[in-house]
Image (cartoon, helix red, strand yellow):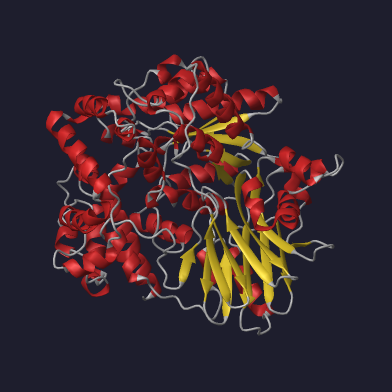
Amino acid sequence: MSTIFGKCNIDKQPVLTDEAVLMKVALDHWNADASGIWADEQTMLGQLTLFNTPESFHEKLPFTDAVSGMTIVADARIDNREELFRKLGVMQDERPQLADSILILKAYCKYGEECLSHFVGDFTFAIWDPSEQKLFCVRDHVGIKPLFYYSDDHFFAFASEKKGLLAIPGIKQKANHDYLMKMVGFIDHNEAETSYEGISRLPPGHFVSIQGKCLKLTKYWELDTEQEIIYKDPRDYVHAFKELFDEAIKCRLRSAFTVGAELSGGLDSSGITCIAARMLHEEGKKIATFSYGFDEKSKTFYHNTEDLIEEHFADEVIAFANVDKVIKIREDGYSNFMEEIDLALRINDGPGVLLPWHDPLKKKVVEENVRVLLSGFPGDQMVTSYAEGYFFEHFEKKRYRTFLKEAKREMGAMKALALLFKATADCYLEKSLTAYRKKRFIQNHRNLPGNFLTPTLSHAEYQRLVKDPPGWPRSYRRLQKMSLQKILVSNRPETEDRNSLLYKSETRFPMADRRLLQFMLSIPAGQKANATGGRLLYRKSMAAVIPESIIRRTDKESLIHPFVLPNWIRDQGSIAAWLKQAGLPERLPYVNFDKLMAGYSLDNDRDYFILNGRMNRKRLHCIVRWLEKNNL
């Protein structure tokens, strides 16, 4: 994992060296292992490199190809190296030390923009082509690596973190209140939006090219909901899944340092840990696991001992996989709520996905000389989905009796009939129902516990904020794709990526391997779920791979991070006092201040916060603090 940045002056003015230095200084808050800046008259590219893969130690970026004159910066891990070596004719003696960035540049020289269909891995990169006078910036298929950009009539600039863009004198720090209103109201925002006006996020599976005054944003990949994989023998699904899952884990073990794994004791992290441990042990290498444990304070708070069972399952996996190093995190390290908020703002460069429980774990990772941490996210959204709504596959195939039978089992007869009617109407009256769906969505949304928009917000304002809500998915594959693309899901990897960078490590996500995602999306719903529940294929595939007690689990405890709720209840009085003096009604006139403040009471118990928009309150705290600190 590394940081890239750059600037291209559209107005043909010379690039100022001072601006490159300002961006570099702002971005090098993690003490990079190597750095470099390249510039010609109107274009500048910069790189801050983290040494992680064996090849990265030989990488000197920015790199300029002597033949083509093209220059590249990249934050990349390419997983199909052997395949690309063959396609590109890379000599055998060159391969061991050839960096992933050079492999990308070779592919671009041969295939141009079409090179993206040849890559498997996680990456962002930028290439300057002097012959075409074109800058080409890319974000990987699934969106694991982040990239942000700014463009006006004078220049285009990009960076792995927004702080790099904010360091440029010509970019003003101005709050995007439409984005903030959507956060306050728990409304999905556009995937390109950020908390700053003028700064955009490059969406997953997209590239942006700048040539002259022409800026072109292009989607080059998305999951294919029409593709179907059908095997005659059901055992072939298990065999194919095992191959893909093993490969997804294996290619993410490539590191010159110790490999670690997050371990909760759930199905996802247990499978990854056991397979990774086996592979590493076969190579004579070690694995470390990182889990959250309960201190005496947490045990007292969670008086029901059943709540503590997640740690017990993690211990079973540790013994089963013969884990070499076991690290338990029993303290969060935050002395008060403001420290937690300020860290979140530092990671996201403003309000964003809030993961306060991750930082204590990331700190332990660097102490153990670990630079790769394997995560089970986003298993729940696809690979190990609980398969809610799997019966929509029967609707797609026009098996309406079976659809009703399966839906009835999950939601009751009347709701199943109503769902069939709505889905059928949506198929034939899609355009006519768009306005109706939007109206109903707004009506229902006003009363959500996590919606803190003022009730006086006009219907017209809601209409402007809410994009057309999707209709009924018509197929289970579309439903799964929608789940994976939810903003809070798709933006989480970028937050984890930046949090890891603070401690010179990298989080990798086997469950987000695009080959594995497409396979799971394409197989029949009956292979993923039945009347007894979801995760069917995963459970079959993990037989003898993980402990039987884990395979049989049908629950998922919410207490993987034991100190989050105790701290919340500890701090609620202080939070309420701070909000009262923060000038909230003036700073955020669209917030329902009375509803927000009613949630802070010393009489509230842990269940209250789970049921009453706890996480959206935390996001609102970040918004208030961000506006306060930056005088916005």
Count of numbered labels shown in the rendering: 0
The structure residue drawn at horizontal position 40% and vertical position 38%, both measured from the top left corner, is 381
Percent across and percent down for residue 523 are 45, 29
The structure residue drawn at horizontal position 74% and vertical position 76%, both measured from the top left corner, is 40
Percent across and percent down for residue 82 are 74, 38
The structure residue drawn at horizontal position 55% and vertical position 20%, both measured from the top left corner, is 239
Task: Classify residue 329 as left or right of residue 615.
Answer: right
Q: Quadrant of residue 185?
A: bottom left
Image quadrant in which the C terminus is located: bottom left
Of 436 and 601, which appears nearest the observer?
436
The structure residue drawn at horizontal position 61% and vertical position 84%, both measured from the top left corner, is 11
The vertical placement of 585 against 184, above or below, is below
Does the image show residue 112? yes
The vertical placement of 455 against 269, above or below, is below
The vertical placement of 631 against 83, above or below, is below
Of 559 and 547, which appears nearest the observer?
547
Task: Classify residue 192 as left or right of residue 41.
Answer: left
